[in-house]
Image (cartoon, rainbow, N blue to C red):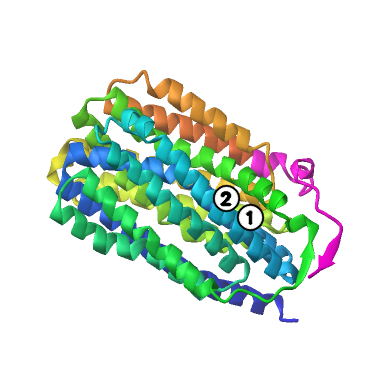
Amino acid sequence: MPSSRGAFRSLLRSGSVVAVAMAVMNVATYGFQLVSARVLGPQPYGAFAALMNTLLVVTVLQLGLQATAARRIAADPAHVQQIERVVLAVTYRAALVLGAALLLASPLIDRALRLESLPTAALVALSAVPLTVMGGQAGILQGERRWRALAAIYLAAGVPRLLLGTVFIAFSPTEAAAMAGVTVTSFAPALVGWWFLRQGHPTGERHVDHRVGNIVRETLHNSQALFAFFALSSIDVIIARNTLDAHDAGLYAGGLILTKATLFLPQFVVVVAFPELSQPAERRHALTRSLILVLLLGLATAGGAWLLPDLTLAFIGGREFAEIASRLWLFALIGTVLSMLQLLVYAVLARRGQRSAYLLWTGLLVLIGAGFVVDSVDALIGVVLVTDSTLLLALLGISLFLVPDPDDETADQPASGEGRTHG
Protein backbone atom coordinates (compact mmCIF):
# COMPACT_ATOMS: atom_id res chain seq x y z
CA MET A 1 0.00 0.00 0.00
CA PRO A 2 1.25 3.55 -0.64
CA SER A 3 2.49 5.57 2.33
CA SER A 4 0.19 8.12 3.93
CA ARG A 5 2.51 10.91 2.73
CA GLY A 6 2.35 9.59 -0.84
CA ALA A 7 -1.43 9.30 -0.65
CA PHE A 8 -1.64 12.87 0.60
CA ARG A 9 0.53 14.14 -2.26
CA SER A 10 -1.59 12.21 -4.73
CA LEU A 11 -4.71 13.77 -3.24
CA LEU A 12 -3.25 17.24 -3.57
CA ARG A 13 -2.34 16.62 -7.21
CA SER A 14 -5.84 15.32 -7.95
CA GLY A 15 -7.44 18.16 -6.05
CA SER A 16 -5.30 20.68 -7.91
CA VAL A 17 -6.63 19.53 -11.28
CA VAL A 18 -10.22 19.98 -10.15
CA ALA A 19 -9.41 23.17 -8.24
CA VAL A 20 -7.94 24.84 -11.34
CA ALA A 21 -10.93 23.78 -13.45
CA MET A 22 -13.37 25.07 -10.83
CA ALA A 23 -11.45 28.32 -10.59
CA VAL A 24 -11.66 28.78 -14.36
CA MET A 25 -15.38 27.91 -14.26
CA ASN A 26 -16.06 30.43 -11.52
CA VAL A 27 -13.98 33.15 -13.14
CA ALA A 28 -15.79 32.58 -16.44
CA THR A 29 -19.15 32.66 -14.70
CA TYR A 30 -18.17 35.83 -12.88
CA GLY A 31 -16.91 37.30 -16.15
CA PHE A 32 -20.27 36.72 -17.79
CA GLN A 33 -22.02 38.36 -14.84
CA LEU A 34 -19.69 41.33 -15.17
CA VAL A 35 -20.22 41.65 -18.91
CA SER A 36 -23.98 41.33 -18.41
CA ALA A 37 -24.03 44.07 -15.77
CA ARG A 38 -22.08 46.42 -18.02
CA VAL A 39 -24.08 45.74 -21.18
CA LEU A 40 -27.56 45.48 -19.67
CA GLY A 41 -27.46 48.20 -17.01
CA PRO A 42 -29.09 48.15 -13.54
CA GLN A 43 -32.75 47.39 -14.31
CA PRO A 44 -32.38 44.61 -16.94
CA TYR A 45 -29.46 43.16 -15.03
CA GLY A 46 -31.55 43.10 -11.87
CA ALA A 47 -34.06 40.86 -13.67
CA PHE A 48 -31.31 38.62 -15.07
CA ALA A 49 -29.67 38.31 -11.64
CA ALA A 50 -33.01 37.24 -10.17
CA LEU A 51 -33.33 34.58 -12.88
CA MET A 52 -29.83 33.29 -12.21
CA ASN A 53 -30.43 33.10 -8.48
CA THR A 54 -33.65 31.18 -9.11
CA LEU A 55 -31.76 28.76 -11.36
CA LEU A 56 -29.07 28.39 -8.70
CA VAL A 57 -31.67 27.36 -6.14
CA VAL A 58 -33.62 24.89 -8.30
CA THR A 59 -30.48 23.13 -9.55
CA VAL A 60 -29.47 21.99 -6.07
CA LEU A 61 -30.81 18.64 -7.23
CA GLN A 62 -27.71 18.55 -9.44
CA LEU A 63 -25.45 18.84 -6.38
CA GLY A 64 -27.52 16.34 -4.43
CA LEU A 65 -27.10 13.78 -7.20
CA GLN A 66 -23.39 14.49 -7.42
CA ALA A 67 -22.86 14.05 -3.67
CA THR A 68 -24.85 10.80 -3.64
CA ALA A 69 -23.06 9.26 -6.62
CA ALA A 70 -19.59 10.29 -5.47
CA ARG A 71 -20.06 9.02 -1.91
CA ARG A 72 -21.51 5.67 -2.95
CA ILE A 73 -18.92 4.89 -5.64
CA ALA A 74 -15.99 5.96 -3.46
CA ALA A 75 -17.29 3.92 -0.51
CA ASP A 76 -18.20 0.80 -2.54
CA PRO A 77 -16.10 0.61 -5.74
CA ALA A 78 -16.89 -3.10 -6.14
CA HIS A 79 -20.40 -2.13 -7.26
CA VAL A 80 -19.48 0.80 -9.49
CA GLN A 81 -21.31 -0.74 -12.46
CA GLN A 82 -24.61 -0.98 -10.62
CA ILE A 83 -24.26 2.43 -8.99
CA GLU A 84 -23.42 4.14 -12.27
CA ARG A 85 -26.36 2.54 -14.06
CA VAL A 86 -28.88 3.36 -11.32
CA VAL A 87 -27.55 6.88 -10.75
CA LEU A 88 -27.82 7.73 -14.44
CA ALA A 89 -31.35 6.32 -14.61
CA VAL A 90 -32.37 8.36 -11.57
CA THR A 91 -30.59 11.44 -12.96
CA TYR A 92 -32.38 11.42 -16.32
CA ARG A 93 -35.78 10.91 -14.72
CA ALA A 94 -35.14 13.60 -12.11
CA ALA A 95 -34.03 16.07 -14.80
CA LEU A 96 -37.21 15.56 -16.82
CA VAL A 97 -39.48 15.79 -13.78
CA LEU A 98 -37.78 18.96 -12.56
CA GLY A 99 -37.91 20.54 -16.01
CA ALA A 100 -41.62 19.76 -16.38
CA ALA A 101 -42.40 21.09 -12.91
CA LEU A 102 -40.54 24.34 -13.57
CA LEU A 103 -42.23 24.73 -16.93
CA LEU A 104 -45.61 24.48 -15.22
CA ALA A 105 -44.39 26.98 -12.63
CA SER A 106 -43.24 29.50 -15.26
CA PRO A 107 -46.21 31.85 -14.63
CA LEU A 108 -45.32 31.92 -10.92
CA ILE A 109 -41.65 32.61 -11.68
CA ASP A 110 -42.68 35.37 -14.09
CA ARG A 111 -44.87 37.01 -11.46
CA ALA A 112 -42.46 36.55 -8.53
CA LEU A 113 -39.55 38.09 -10.44
CA ARG A 114 -41.73 40.73 -12.15
CA LEU A 115 -40.34 39.79 -15.55
CA GLU A 116 -43.46 40.42 -17.64
CA SER A 117 -42.16 37.75 -20.04
CA LEU A 118 -43.41 34.18 -19.75
CA PRO A 119 -40.92 32.81 -22.36
CA THR A 120 -38.04 34.27 -20.35
CA ALA A 121 -39.31 32.57 -17.19
CA ALA A 122 -39.64 29.28 -19.08
CA LEU A 123 -35.92 29.34 -19.89
CA VAL A 124 -35.25 28.48 -16.24
CA ALA A 125 -36.98 25.14 -16.82
CA LEU A 126 -35.02 24.43 -20.00
CA SER A 127 -31.71 25.25 -18.33
CA ALA A 128 -32.41 23.07 -15.30
CA VAL A 129 -32.65 19.85 -17.35
CA PRO A 130 -29.04 19.61 -18.66
CA LEU A 131 -27.63 21.06 -15.44
CA THR A 132 -29.33 18.29 -13.44
CA VAL A 133 -27.93 15.67 -15.83
CA MET A 134 -24.49 17.17 -15.29
CA GLY A 135 -24.82 16.54 -11.54
CA GLY A 136 -25.21 12.77 -11.84
CA GLN A 137 -22.43 12.56 -14.42
CA ALA A 138 -20.02 14.64 -12.32
CA GLY A 139 -20.75 12.55 -9.23
CA ILE A 140 -19.90 9.32 -11.05
CA LEU A 141 -16.61 10.72 -12.35
CA GLN A 142 -15.77 12.14 -8.93
CA GLY A 143 -16.47 8.83 -7.21
CA GLU A 144 -14.34 6.98 -9.76
CA ARG A 145 -11.59 9.57 -9.24
CA ARG A 146 -11.50 10.44 -12.93
CA TRP A 147 -10.27 13.91 -12.13
CA ARG A 148 -9.40 15.09 -15.62
CA ALA A 149 -12.82 14.13 -16.94
CA LEU A 150 -14.46 15.90 -13.99
CA ALA A 151 -12.30 18.95 -14.66
CA ALA A 152 -13.46 18.94 -18.29
CA ILE A 153 -17.09 19.07 -17.15
CA TYR A 154 -16.37 22.05 -14.92
CA LEU A 155 -14.58 23.86 -17.74
CA ALA A 156 -17.51 23.19 -20.08
CA ALA A 157 -19.87 24.64 -17.46
CA GLY A 158 -18.08 27.98 -17.43
CA VAL A 159 -16.14 28.85 -20.58
CA PRO A 160 -18.96 28.43 -23.15
CA ARG A 161 -21.25 30.58 -21.00
CA LEU A 162 -18.79 33.44 -21.07
CA LEU A 163 -18.05 33.19 -24.79
CA LEU A 164 -21.46 32.41 -26.28
CA GLY A 165 -23.40 34.26 -23.60
CA THR A 166 -21.52 37.44 -24.46
CA VAL A 167 -22.49 36.98 -28.11
CA PHE A 168 -26.15 36.68 -27.14
CA ILE A 169 -26.27 39.89 -25.10
CA ALA A 170 -24.17 41.76 -27.65
CA PHE A 171 -26.81 40.90 -30.25
CA SER A 172 -29.70 41.80 -27.93
CA PRO A 173 -28.91 43.57 -24.62
CA THR A 174 -31.89 42.21 -22.68
CA GLU A 175 -32.40 39.84 -19.77
CA ALA A 176 -34.15 37.42 -22.17
CA ALA A 177 -31.08 37.20 -24.43
CA ALA A 178 -28.77 36.75 -21.45
CA MET A 179 -30.92 33.91 -20.12
CA ALA A 180 -31.10 32.35 -23.59
CA GLY A 181 -27.30 32.28 -23.67
CA VAL A 182 -27.25 30.53 -20.30
CA THR A 183 -29.79 27.96 -21.52
CA VAL A 184 -27.93 27.08 -24.71
CA THR A 185 -24.55 26.74 -22.99
CA SER A 186 -26.02 24.62 -20.17
CA PHE A 187 -25.99 21.66 -22.56
CA ALA A 188 -22.18 21.80 -22.96
CA PRO A 189 -21.19 20.11 -19.65
CA ALA A 190 -23.89 17.45 -20.08
CA LEU A 191 -22.51 16.59 -23.51
CA VAL A 192 -18.98 16.39 -22.12
CA GLY A 193 -20.19 14.11 -19.33
CA TRP A 194 -21.99 11.88 -21.82
CA TRP A 195 -18.80 11.58 -23.87
CA PHE A 196 -16.72 10.38 -20.93
CA LEU A 197 -19.39 7.95 -19.70
CA ARG A 198 -20.59 6.70 -23.09
CA GLN A 199 -18.89 3.28 -22.85
CA GLY A 200 -20.16 2.42 -19.38
CA HIS A 201 -19.04 -0.68 -17.49
CA PRO A 202 -19.70 -4.38 -17.95
CA THR A 203 -22.32 -5.88 -15.68
CA GLY A 204 -20.95 -6.77 -12.24
CA GLU A 205 -22.06 -7.43 -8.68
CA ARG A 206 -25.24 -5.91 -7.31
CA HIS A 207 -26.10 -4.83 -3.78
CA VAL A 208 -29.54 -4.06 -2.41
CA ASP A 209 -28.29 -0.83 -0.84
CA HIS A 210 -27.79 0.66 -4.31
CA ARG A 211 -31.32 0.21 -5.54
CA VAL A 212 -33.28 3.13 -6.97
CA GLY A 213 -35.23 3.83 -3.78
CA ASN A 214 -32.14 4.14 -1.59
CA ILE A 215 -30.36 6.41 -4.05
CA VAL A 216 -33.43 8.59 -4.40
CA ARG A 217 -33.75 8.94 -0.61
CA GLU A 218 -30.12 9.91 -0.15
CA THR A 219 -30.30 12.34 -3.04
CA LEU A 220 -33.38 14.01 -1.58
CA HIS A 221 -31.70 14.31 1.81
CA ASN A 222 -28.59 15.91 0.30
CA SER A 223 -30.65 18.13 -2.00
CA GLN A 224 -32.90 19.52 0.72
CA ALA A 225 -29.87 20.61 2.78
CA LEU A 226 -28.23 22.21 -0.26
CA PHE A 227 -31.54 23.73 -1.32
CA ALA A 228 -31.85 25.45 2.04
CA PHE A 229 -28.33 26.85 1.73
CA PHE A 230 -28.67 28.12 -1.83
CA ALA A 231 -32.11 29.54 -1.11
CA LEU A 232 -30.58 31.36 1.84
CA SER A 233 -27.76 32.70 -0.35
CA SER A 234 -30.08 33.72 -3.20
CA ILE A 235 -33.38 34.86 -1.72
CA ASP A 236 -32.15 38.39 -1.02
CA VAL A 237 -32.13 39.38 -4.69
CA ILE A 238 -35.76 38.24 -4.96
CA ILE A 239 -36.58 40.20 -1.81
CA ALA A 240 -34.89 43.24 -3.38
CA ARG A 241 -36.98 42.86 -6.53
CA ASN A 242 -40.16 42.97 -4.47
CA THR A 243 -39.35 45.52 -1.73
CA LEU A 244 -37.10 48.08 -3.44
CA ASP A 245 -37.71 50.13 -6.55
CA ALA A 246 -36.27 48.84 -9.82
CA HIS A 247 -33.19 51.09 -9.65
CA ASP A 248 -32.22 50.16 -6.09
CA ALA A 249 -32.94 46.48 -6.78
CA GLY A 250 -30.54 46.67 -9.72
CA LEU A 251 -27.88 48.32 -7.56
CA TYR A 252 -28.26 45.58 -4.95
CA ALA A 253 -27.98 42.93 -7.68
CA GLY A 254 -24.77 44.60 -8.86
CA GLY A 255 -23.29 44.39 -5.36
CA LEU A 256 -24.19 40.71 -5.27
CA ILE A 257 -21.74 40.10 -8.12
CA LEU A 258 -18.98 40.62 -5.57
CA THR A 259 -20.87 38.48 -3.05
CA LYS A 260 -21.10 35.59 -5.50
CA ALA A 261 -17.45 35.94 -6.48
CA THR A 262 -16.41 35.81 -2.83
CA LEU A 263 -18.69 32.83 -2.26
CA PHE A 264 -17.69 30.67 -5.23
CA LEU A 265 -14.02 31.40 -5.82
CA PRO A 266 -12.91 29.43 -2.69
CA GLN A 267 -14.91 26.35 -3.74
CA PHE A 268 -11.66 24.49 -4.35
CA VAL A 269 -11.26 24.36 -0.57
CA VAL A 270 -14.36 22.17 -0.32
CA VAL A 271 -13.06 19.89 -3.08
CA VAL A 272 -9.69 19.35 -1.39
CA ALA A 273 -11.05 19.16 2.18
CA PHE A 274 -14.05 16.92 1.57
CA PRO A 275 -12.15 13.58 1.79
CA GLU A 276 -10.71 14.59 5.17
CA LEU A 277 -14.11 15.84 6.32
CA SER A 278 -15.39 12.31 5.66
CA GLN A 279 -12.79 10.82 8.03
CA PRO A 280 -13.82 11.00 11.72
CA ALA A 281 -10.24 11.26 12.96
CA GLU A 282 -9.42 14.18 10.65
CA ARG A 283 -12.77 15.96 10.51
CA ARG A 284 -12.30 18.63 13.17
CA HIS A 285 -8.78 19.63 12.12
CA ALA A 286 -9.73 19.66 8.43
CA LEU A 287 -12.78 21.79 9.11
CA THR A 288 -10.82 24.26 11.25
CA ARG A 289 -8.02 24.66 8.70
CA SER A 290 -10.47 25.02 5.82
CA LEU A 291 -12.59 27.61 7.62
CA ILE A 292 -9.51 29.68 8.42
CA LEU A 293 -8.38 29.57 4.79
CA VAL A 294 -11.81 30.61 3.49
CA LEU A 295 -12.01 33.37 6.11
CA LEU A 296 -8.62 34.78 5.14
CA LEU A 297 -9.51 34.78 1.44
CA GLY A 298 -12.81 36.49 2.16
CA LEU A 299 -11.33 39.12 4.45
CA ALA A 300 -8.69 39.88 1.83
CA THR A 301 -11.45 40.49 -0.71
CA ALA A 302 -13.48 42.63 1.69
CA GLY A 303 -10.37 44.60 2.66
CA GLY A 304 -9.55 45.26 -0.97
CA ALA A 305 -13.10 46.46 -1.64
CA TRP A 306 -12.91 48.78 1.39
CA LEU A 307 -9.52 50.26 0.50
CA LEU A 308 -10.10 50.44 -3.28
CA PRO A 309 -13.84 50.91 -3.84
CA ASP A 310 -13.45 52.62 -7.21
CA LEU A 311 -11.25 49.84 -8.55
CA THR A 312 -13.64 47.22 -7.18
CA LEU A 313 -16.51 49.03 -8.86
CA ALA A 314 -14.92 48.29 -12.23
CA PHE A 315 -15.41 44.59 -11.53
CA ILE A 316 -19.15 44.80 -10.86
CA GLY A 317 -20.44 46.90 -13.71
CA GLY A 318 -18.75 50.31 -13.73
CA ARG A 319 -19.94 53.80 -12.93
CA GLU A 320 -23.64 52.97 -13.32
CA PHE A 321 -23.33 51.22 -9.93
CA ALA A 322 -21.32 54.04 -8.30
CA GLU A 323 -24.00 54.61 -5.64
CA ILE A 324 -23.01 51.40 -3.86
CA ALA A 325 -19.22 51.81 -4.16
CA SER A 326 -18.82 52.61 -0.46
CA ARG A 327 -20.78 49.46 0.52
CA LEU A 328 -19.01 46.93 -1.69
CA TRP A 329 -16.89 45.68 1.21
CA LEU A 330 -20.11 44.70 2.97
CA PHE A 331 -21.18 42.61 -0.03
CA ALA A 332 -17.78 40.90 0.08
CA LEU A 333 -18.27 40.28 3.80
CA ILE A 334 -21.63 38.63 3.08
CA GLY A 335 -19.91 36.40 0.54
CA THR A 336 -17.26 35.47 3.11
CA VAL A 337 -19.89 34.41 5.64
CA LEU A 338 -21.74 32.43 2.98
CA SER A 339 -18.57 30.65 1.80
CA MET A 340 -17.88 29.53 5.37
CA LEU A 341 -21.49 28.39 5.69
CA GLN A 342 -21.15 26.39 2.49
CA LEU A 343 -18.13 24.57 3.89
CA LEU A 344 -20.08 23.74 7.05
CA VAL A 345 -22.98 22.38 5.00
CA TYR A 346 -20.65 20.01 3.14
CA ALA A 347 -19.16 18.98 6.47
CA VAL A 348 -22.68 17.98 7.53
CA LEU A 349 -23.10 15.94 4.32
CA ALA A 350 -19.69 14.33 4.84
CA ARG A 351 -20.70 13.00 8.24
CA ARG A 352 -24.15 12.13 6.84
CA GLY A 353 -25.81 14.34 9.43
CA GLN A 354 -29.38 15.51 9.09
CA ARG A 355 -30.53 17.54 12.07
CA SER A 356 -28.11 20.41 11.41
CA ALA A 357 -29.91 21.13 8.14
CA TYR A 358 -32.96 22.28 10.09
CA LEU A 359 -31.04 25.38 11.17
CA LEU A 360 -30.62 26.35 7.51
CA TRP A 361 -34.36 26.28 7.01
CA THR A 362 -34.85 28.35 10.16
CA GLY A 363 -32.36 30.94 8.94
CA LEU A 364 -34.08 31.09 5.56
CA LEU A 365 -37.48 31.75 7.17
CA VAL A 366 -36.01 34.45 9.40
CA LEU A 367 -34.37 36.15 6.42
CA ILE A 368 -37.60 36.12 4.42
CA GLY A 369 -39.63 37.48 7.34
CA ALA A 370 -37.17 40.27 8.13
CA GLY A 371 -36.23 41.03 4.54
CA PHE A 372 -39.70 41.80 3.29
CA VAL A 373 -40.11 44.69 5.74
CA VAL A 374 -36.99 46.61 4.64
CA ASP A 375 -37.19 49.65 2.40
CA SER A 376 -33.57 50.44 1.51
CA VAL A 377 -30.40 48.83 0.22
CA ASP A 378 -28.59 49.46 3.52
CA ALA A 379 -31.36 47.87 5.56
CA LEU A 380 -31.39 44.75 3.37
CA ILE A 381 -27.59 44.44 3.62
CA GLY A 382 -27.87 44.62 7.40
CA VAL A 383 -30.61 41.99 7.63
CA VAL A 384 -28.73 39.57 5.37
CA LEU A 385 -25.40 40.02 7.16
CA VAL A 386 -26.86 39.59 10.66
CA THR A 387 -28.97 36.55 9.69
CA ASP A 388 -26.14 34.76 7.87
CA SER A 389 -23.61 35.51 10.61
CA THR A 390 -25.90 34.21 13.35
CA LEU A 391 -26.49 31.01 11.40
CA LEU A 392 -22.75 30.60 10.80
CA LEU A 393 -22.00 30.83 14.52
CA ALA A 394 -24.73 28.32 15.34
CA LEU A 395 -23.54 25.73 12.80
CA LEU A 396 -19.93 26.32 13.75
CA GLY A 397 -20.70 25.58 17.39
CA ILE A 398 -22.54 22.39 16.48
CA SER A 399 -19.85 21.13 14.09
CA LEU A 400 -16.87 21.83 16.35
CA PHE A 401 -18.26 21.23 19.82
CA LEU A 402 -21.56 19.36 19.81
CA VAL A 403 -20.68 16.59 17.35
CA PRO A 404 -17.36 15.22 18.67
CA ASP A 405 -18.42 11.61 18.18
CA PRO A 406 -18.71 10.49 14.52
CA ASP A 407 -21.60 8.25 15.53
CA ASP A 408 -23.68 11.07 17.04
CA GLU A 409 -25.94 11.38 14.02
CA THR A 410 -25.97 7.79 12.82
CA ALA A 411 -29.59 7.50 13.82
CA ASP A 412 -30.39 9.82 10.94
CA GLN A 413 -28.67 7.63 8.38
CA PRO A 414 -30.54 5.11 6.27
CA ALA A 415 -29.73 1.54 7.06
CA SER A 416 -27.58 -0.22 4.51
CA GLY A 417 -28.79 -3.38 2.89
CA GLU A 418 -27.13 -6.66 3.67
CA GLY A 419 -27.72 -8.85 0.67
CA ARG A 420 -26.14 -8.86 -2.73
CA THR A 421 -26.73 -10.64 -5.97
CA HIS A 422 -24.68 -11.25 -9.07
CA GLY A 423 -25.75 -10.34 -12.55
Res. 335 image quadrant:
top left
Depth check: give the residue in front, 341 or 142. Answer: 142
Q: Which residues are magenta?
A: 398-423
Say whether residue 223 is left or right of residue 231.
right
Vertical position of residue 9 compared to residue 310: above or below: below
Question: Dot 2: what SS?
Answer: helix
In reply to whether residue 209 is colored magenta, the answer given is no
Disc number for residue 64: 2
Q: Which image quarter holds the N terminus?
A: bottom right
**Residue, disc 1:** 68
The answer to whether mark 2 and mark 1 are in CB contact below 8 A is: yes
Res. 376 image quadrant:
top left
Q: Residue furthest right?
A: 419
**Residue 226 in sight here:** yes
Q: Residue furthest top?
A: 373
Say whether residue 163 is left or right of residue 86.
left
In the image, residue 66 lies at what x, y percent? 57, 57
Vertical position of residue 205 compared to residue 353: above or below: below
User: Looking at the image, which residue is at 35% across and 51% down?
Assistant: 261
In the image, residue 368 lies at what x, y percent? 44, 25
Res. 131 image quadrant:
bottom left
Vertical position of residue 81 compared to residue 112: above or below: below
